[in-house]
Image: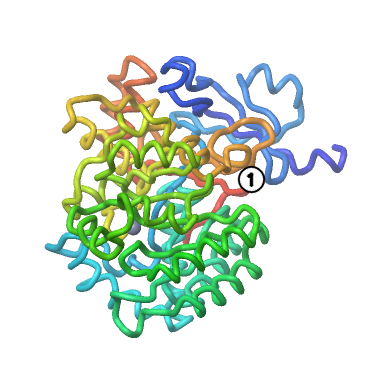
Amino acid sequence: MPTKLTHLKGWRSAILHSIADPNDVGIEQSYEYFPDGLLVTNKDKIIALGNAEEILKNYPDLAVQHYPDSLILPGFIDTHIHYPQVDVIGSYGEQLLDWLNNYTFPAEAKFSDKEHAKKIAHIFLKELLSCGTTTALVFGTVHKTSVDAFFECSEQYNLRMICGKVMMDRNAPDNLVDTPESSYQDSKELIEKWHEKGRNLYAVTPRFAPTSSSEQLHKAGQLLREHNNLYLHTHLSENTNECDWVQSLFPEADNYLDVYNRHNLLTERSVFAHGIHLCDSEYKTLAQNGSAIAFCPTSNLFLGSGLFRLDKAEQHNVNVGLGTDVGGGTSFSMLQTINEAYKVIQLQNTRLNPFKSLYLATLGGAKSLRLEDKVGNLAVNTEADFIVLDYKATPLLDYRLSQSKSLMETLFVLMTLGDDRCVKHTIVAGEEIKIS
Ligand SMILES: [Zn+2]
């Protein structure tokens, strides 16, 4: 066999991926499905996708891994999650502002210790990978060490990850605040060390408007202007008490989003978590700037924050991805996040089609992060990040899927009953990750 072929691998199974937003093209045009499909990878890239028998004609000597009773999907994309909050997932009894003070801030204080940060980064990434999530937009803590520990770990797995140091100079405990200048300097050093190094990308990460002074938000905007392709990652309009607080802290702003807009923080790589209590002009401003919202259903329900208006985001052409928002969210699993998203939409008397859910969890997330040429579907020349879901993962799933009469039904059942138990294999950059 010629040397150049030794890196080729074939992956045979039913294969499904999104190719467009169902809202733009209709459900039937939004996906490709191969009941007996074959994906061919060369090192870290996908080089062929289609019906197995046809593709195999072009690769007669290909080594093929065959997965019957399974479904290959692109790796999931989580557009909003906090790695330091592994310690507080499932904490009882509070809404956002008390939950931050009583649970989150004490847990985040421990991340000044690099060893602790490394330990949690490993636990966090293993959990994401075992749930089939291969790309995420991730909050660190205010400590520079937290981001170093995260990227060192993500680099070991060769993951496409986005992370950033929290900028927070007020309304937080003394051991968790920085200053406008120190946050600028620390962020800048981290950007130079990690941004676009390997598969790592950096996000400028003011926690949310109440914990940053105007001076610090200006510094965040300055960082965005000084470097190419940086992300802006923050929270927006999650809880009504939070919204009132923002109005009192920034009385000159027209609305919550306007606080960020006045500091030049709206770009096509800006991702705002939640966006529940928005007015029409805020959706319009998000769309005009090409910024995205991370829809985090398990968190929005768990913290009693409210119901995200997907219909409004669609009407205004705002990019939307799904986020788990662990630890306000209650599951790392994107399948379980989709399950809860469906219920959030049901409570608004409308339906979330499973192909739309697939889009939100994969290609829609990638588009929100401007990574759709790299991840989010299985198109030729994209990066080979994908998962193998097991139709027989549990006795109930096995039985229920045996009754399924259509691909849509199979997908919906997987999204309703499925979780990390379904994720049999996680392949990153063409290599299966062994999670131990
Ligand atoms: Zn969050």
Residue at the (52%, 59%) spot, across then down: 203
Q: Is 378 on the left or on the right of 164, as rendered?
A: right
Camera-side residue: 56 or 414?
414
Q: Quadrant of residue 297?
A: top left
Q: Which element type, helix, strand or loop, lies under badge 1? A: loop
Above or below, comparing residue 398 to residue 121 in the picture: above
Where does residue 259 sit, x and y in percent of width and height? Answer: 37, 56
Where does residue 348 sit, x and y in percent of width and height? Answer: 18, 30
Where does residue 385 sit, x and y in percent of width and height? Answer: 57, 43
Above or below, comparing residue 128 to residue 217 in the picture: above
Residue kind at label 1, given as amino acid type: Gly
Q: Quadrant of the N terminus?
A: top right
Residue at the (35%, 56%) spot, across then down: 235
Residue at the (20%, 57%) spot, across then down: 244
Q: Quadrant of residue 57?
A: top right
Where does residue 239 sit, x and y in percent of width and height? Answer: 21, 54
Q: Would residue 276 be seen by someone viewing this image from the given angle?
A: yes
Q: Is 232 on the left or on the right of 94, as rendered?
A: right
Camera-side residue: 381 or 207?
207
Camera-side residue: 406 or 23?
23
Label 1 environment density (alpha carbons within 10 Å; few <14, some 14–19, many ≥20): many
Q: Residue furthest right?
A: 2
Camera-side residue: 270 or 307?
270
**View quadrant of ligand 1:** bottom left
Q: Residue furthest front?
A: 252
Q: Does any atom of ligand 1 lie closer than 8 Å to the CB of label 1? A: no
Give the colour scheme of this rendering. rainbow
Q: Which residue is mark 1?
A: 430
